[in-house]
Amino acid sequence: SCDFQIVDTAGVLKNGMDDWCRAADMILVPMLPSTRDVEPTMRTLEIAAASKTQAKTFIILNCFYAFGRLDRDLVEYLGSENIPVMAKIPRAVALAQAAAEGKSVAEYAPRSHAVPAFELLADDILAEKEKHND
């Protein structure tokens, strides 16, 4: 009886994931653009696929740096594997500062370059939700 439910799991969690995936309308998997995050992210995607969920799965790249070679290479790799990236949330000091204050980045630093990325992510989530409801 809710519009959104967020389950934030560690990259190694397996118990209960099948049920959560099957119950989901959409699965968003956050990932840092680092070589250390590739393996746990791929494992999470495999668990979601094995669950036989009907939900679409998307990657959310956090701390994305458009001029970073690893960041660009990761986007290219994900595309070559047909793994859709829904959002690229840029690196921003304001994100950590806002979290420390217990606020959203939009509340803490409304002019931060990260705010439009979160607004676009919210719009994309709602658009996907509409597609699912049709």
Image: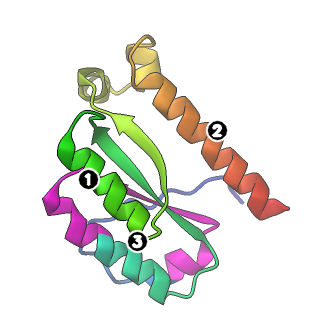
Nearer the observer, 55 or 33: 33
* Distance between the alpha carbons at the discs numbered 1 and 3: 12 Å
Residue 73's disc number: 1
Can you name the residue that lies furthest to the right here? 134
Nearer the observer, 38 or 73: 73
Q: Position of residue 15 (x, y in %)?
A: 35, 84
Residue 17: tell me if it is visible.
no
Nearer the observer, 27 or 80: 80
Q: Residue at x 52, y 76 (%)?
A: 21
* Distance between the alpha carbons at the discs numbered 2 and 1: 26 Å
Can you name the residue that lies furthest to the top here? 111
Would you name the residue on which mark 3 appears? 81
Q: Is residue 13 magenta?
A: no
Q: Which residues are magenta?
A: 19-41
Q: Secondary structure at mark 3?
A: loop
Which colour assignment does the render follow?
A: rainbow
Residue 123's disc number: 2
Q: Residue at x 35, y 56 (%)?
A: 76
Q: Residue at x 61, y 53 (%)?
A: 4
Q: Residue at x 72, y 60 (%)?
A: 1
**Quadrant the C terminus occupies:** bottom right
Q: Is residue 7 above or below residue 46?
A: above
Mark 1: few, some, or many residues within 10 Å (few <14, many ≥20)? few
Residue 96: tell me if it is visible.
yes
| Left or right, 43 with reference to 19 | left
How many labels, in total? 3
| Left or right, 94 with reference to 56 | left
* Distance between the alpha carbons at the discs numbered 3 and 2: 25 Å
Residue 130's disc number: none
